[in-house]
Image (cartoon, grey):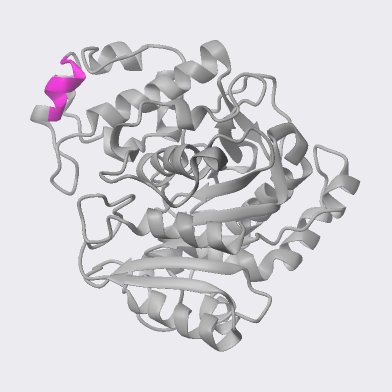
């Protein structure tokens, strides 16, 4: 396995890292490494190079992502599960393909280590407090786990698959007793309904394969950040329409199995989500998802479509979010309240946007609150 003592070029020259690392560690993040630093060890790169937001380069995160790929490649401890197209056993997709054959769920291989995310080095996923939201015996269960499908954000243009995918998967498997899946969904120039259809297919797939993964098919939740939050929140009311679209096309598995299960999640968790395209909205997400089709503004504005059968919902935002206004979460809460949907929506004073687990910020306990909420709600 790699450590921060390996150089960037050493790591990138190793199959399958060079061609696949962008699936887990965004390619635009790697671009922050100056070309002349390629032969430096990763610990030194952290001291020399900076992320776009000014933090030291995330060298430990990069190394962890590389090791996940190596675990998938050499030991099949993790697996990439294609949702639309059949792929050979042990398939690891090239990064940044962004098309139907590259839509997948990343998860622990149930034949090797079903909760592989929980067994990664804790790193930044470990909270700076004791987690009591879920009892220890429930965290360690080997059967009938609830499932979580994680949808990283990125404005429907890229996916923050580490901070809003891998770290959340670690937290939810280790401290919540979940079986985690990270969804690689289609983005710009792929417009609506393709991302939502990918998530609907993921929910169906997880339920169809529930026994294989040791999960309770009646406790499947989706959790998304920013645009990934919009993806989860919109798919939750579009689920039946999307399922019928899926059933109307060829599938790689027996279609009757998909007919028998629902694409409706049993709960949704939303991190600083995009909710509305009507006012105080995130322009980039609207443009990327809709290609600026005006007729989709209301159809994809979540607050307009919440009814009593909407899934139970947790959401949080930071008051000073300069990217997606916190008013999106305020309007969501008002709609959930009006419809009588069980929910917990929280506005924290500061932290801005894209914070992931946010342990050093005022929202440091949002993940604990979410775990407790779904535990209390039964899934």
Identify which residue, 344 or 12, lies in the foreground: 344
Near-viewer residue (170 or 103): 170
**Residues shaded magenta:** 40-46
Quadrant that contains the C terminus: bottom right
Image point 55% across, 88% down: which residue?
Answer: 338
Q: Position of residue 154 (x, y in %)?
A: 39, 53
Residue 333 visible here: yes
Quarter placement of the N terminus: top left
Question: From the viewer's perspective, is residue 88 above or below residue 333?
Answer: above
Residue 134: horizontal and vertical position, in percent? Answer: 49, 49
Q: Residue at position x 23%, y 63% from top?
A: 352
In-front residue for pair 142/268: 142
Residue 180 can be seen, yes or no: no
Query: Percent x, y for residue 345?
Result: 42, 72
Q: Position of residue 41 (x, y in %)?
A: 18, 15
Examine the structure image and report whether residue 41 is included in the region drawn in magenta: yes
Image height of 343 relative to 72, above or below: below
Query: What secondary structure is the magenta-colored segment mainly?
Result: helix
Front residue (pair 9, 351): 351
């Amino acid at each position: 396995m790699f450590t921060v003592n390996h150089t960037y070029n050493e790591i990138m020259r190793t199959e399958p890292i060079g061609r696949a690392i962008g699936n887990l560690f965004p390619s635009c993040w790697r671009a922050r490494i100056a070309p002349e630093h390629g032969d430096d060890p990763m610990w030194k790169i952290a001291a020399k190079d900076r992320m776009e937001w000014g933090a030291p380069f995330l060298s430990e995160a990069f190394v962890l992502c590389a090791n996940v790929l190596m675990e998938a490649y050499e030991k099949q401890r993790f697996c990439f599960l294609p949702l639309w197209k059949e792929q050979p056993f042990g398939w690891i997709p090239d990064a940044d393909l962004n098309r139907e054959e590259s839509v997948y769920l990343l998860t622990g291989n149930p034949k090797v280590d079903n909760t592989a995310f929980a067994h990664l080095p804790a790193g930044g996923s470990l909270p700076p407090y004791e987690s009591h939201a879920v009892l220890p015996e429930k965290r360690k269960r080997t059967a009938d786990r609830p499932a979580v499908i994680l949808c990283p954000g990125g404005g429907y243009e890229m996916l923050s698959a580490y901070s809003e995918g891998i770290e959340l998967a670690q937290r939810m498997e280790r401290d919540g007793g979940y079986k985690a899946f990270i969804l690689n969904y289609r983005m710009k120039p792929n417009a609506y309904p393709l991302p939502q259809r990918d998530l609907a297919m993921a929910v169906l797939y997880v339920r169809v394969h529930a026994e294989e993964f040791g999960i309770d098919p009646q406790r499947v939740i989706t959790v998304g950040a920013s645009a990934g939050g919009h993806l989860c929140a919109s798919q939750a009311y579009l689920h039946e329409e999307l399922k019928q679209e899926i059933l109307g096309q060829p599938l790689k598995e027996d279609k009757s199995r998909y007919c028998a299960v629902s694409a409706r999640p049993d709960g949704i968790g939303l991190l600083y989500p995009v909710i509305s395209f009507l006012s105080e909205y995130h322009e980039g997400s609207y443009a990327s998802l809709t290609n600026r089709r005006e007729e989709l503004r209301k159809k994809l504005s979540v607050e307009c479509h919440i009814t009593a059968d909407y899934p139970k919902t947790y959401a949080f935002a930071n008051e000073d979010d300069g990217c997606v206004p916190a008013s999106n979460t305020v309007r969501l809460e008002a709609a959930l309240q009006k419809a009588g949907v069980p929910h917990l929506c929280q506005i924290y004073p500061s932290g801005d946007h894209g914070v992931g687990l946010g342990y050093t910020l005022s929202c440091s306990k949002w993940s604990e609150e979410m775990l407790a909420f779904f535990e209390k709600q039964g899934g």
